[in-house]
Amino acid sequence: MSGLAKATCLLFLWLPQLRCEGFGDTQPQQVHLSYPGVATSMTVTWTTFDPAESVVNFGLSKGKALTQWARGRAKKFVDGGVLRRSMFIHRVTLRDLSPGQRYAYRCGSQQGWSDTFSFQTLRNGSDWSPRFVIYGDMGLVNPQSLPRLINDTENGMYDVLLHVGDFAYDLHSDDAQVGDAFMRAIEPVAALLPYMTCPGNHEEKYNFSNYRARFSMPGDTEGLWYSWDIGPAHIIAFSTEVYFFLEYGPQLVPKQFQWLERDLQEATRPERRKERPWIITMGHRPMYCSNNDLDDCTNYASRVREGLQPHRYGLEDLFYRYGVDLELWAHEHSYERLWPVYNYKVYNGSTKAPYTNPGAPVHIITGSAGCKERLDPFVPDPRDWSAVRFEDYGYARMQIHNKTHIWLEQVSDDQNGKVLDGIWLIKERRGPKVWQP
């Protein structure tokens, strides 16, 4: 190999978006996991810039021989930018894994292997206590919480990560090279934990094509909404963006709404709700917020809350009707916890224990993981339904302890990991019939 070729390939190691001409670009990068909805399975996704086989070599316990193999396939993705950059997104689902066990793996092919990573499979059934880290709005520039998230993940603090929209700022920018760099940046977290997502407003370019191509969420829907079970919970991820991008929204709003209603009908069947009583939603733009901006959540007739005019496909009534317990949001670059609220009225469980058997869903907004748009200020006086709010970089944690208790807390990166807020959400009764009138 010539000196020039060696120098070019060394540069490629530092800037993987560059092509190493003459040698091919089949080295895996941007490795991340997702949960396909079955406790004995895990999906591995990665990127190459030239065609290559899609293989995962894996085995129990890091440090031991990787004796098992699984194959998948790659799909060519062409970005919508001027350069029409192309890449190959590889997906392999590992099956028949042992629940609750740690596996080591590497992905790629004989044309190039990734580093060796590890993950722990989720447990079967509903009688266990899954741990989550939750945030939205993380960019490639100023991803302030990312080092702390990497450290938490390496210390085994979480089972699943929920990224509630807005990635990279933006995945499509600079002909999708920003998206490539962001996916490499989150690899120390995403290659170890199922990285479960929903789309935000920053993903809308080219009809959400970068988002849909890069992430591997379960289900066979539009790639914008899906649901899955974990422990004693049923989690629903959906797109708030269909209410705002009207070039395709009029078709997708009713389609998503009908899907949501069918999913909630299934989740609230008595035998299903008995096994998995918690119903949790995650969507990017909140229905309520007390931020000092002109976002949808500052409007009384929020589109997400009330739907398209005249009052069609609103999500507040739908979620209330089926007894959704907890609604997770982002978009506002701050943290805000609401009192249990429906139609702007507070329904606390009691004065001393507002989150014990509350009379309405609980909303948490955690969108301050860090991005180039910085933090969002609040209006001076909090609304009646606003319980706690912080203009602070950080992220949320959640542990579903059992079928009646969830612990939620907000961690400050600005304050060196201090827990700023924490509540127990306790539900001994379920379903819309227990809501207060």
Image (tube, rainbow, N blue to C red):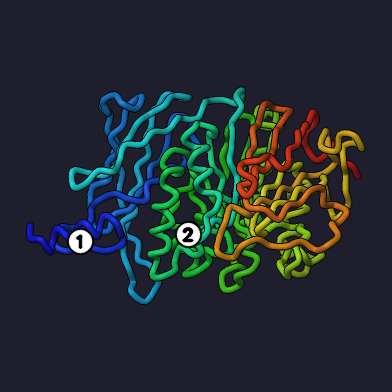
Is 332 or 197 nearer to us in this picture? 332
Residue 275 against residue 12 in the figure, above or below? above
Give the residue at the far left of this rendering: 1
Answer whether labels 2 and 1 touch (C-beta < 8 Å): no
Residue 94: horizontal and vertical position, in percent? 37, 35
Density class for disc 1 (Cα within 10 Å; few <14, some 14-19, many ≥20) is: some
Q: Which mark is residue 140?
A: 2
**Reading the chain from its start, which is encountered first: label 2 or label 1?**
1
Residue 59: horizontal and vertical position, in percent? 32, 27
Amino acid carrying label 1: it is Cys
> Seen in the image, is 62 located left or right of residue 365?
left
Q: Which mark is residue 426?
A: none
Snapshot quadrant of residue 376 = bottom right
Q: Is residue 150 visible?
A: yes
Q: Mark 2 and mark 1: span between their CA atoms?
A: 24 Å
> Seen in the image, is 361 located left or right of residue 21?
right
User: Residue at position x 69%, y 38% from top?
Assistant: 408
> Seen in the image, is 153 located left or right of residue 91?
right
Amino acid carrying label 2: it is Leu
Residue 257: horizontal and vertical position, in percent? 65, 56
Give the residue at the far bottom of this rendering: 82
SS at circle 1: loop
User: Residue at position x 60%, y 57% from top?
Assistant: 239
Residue at the disc numbered 1: 20
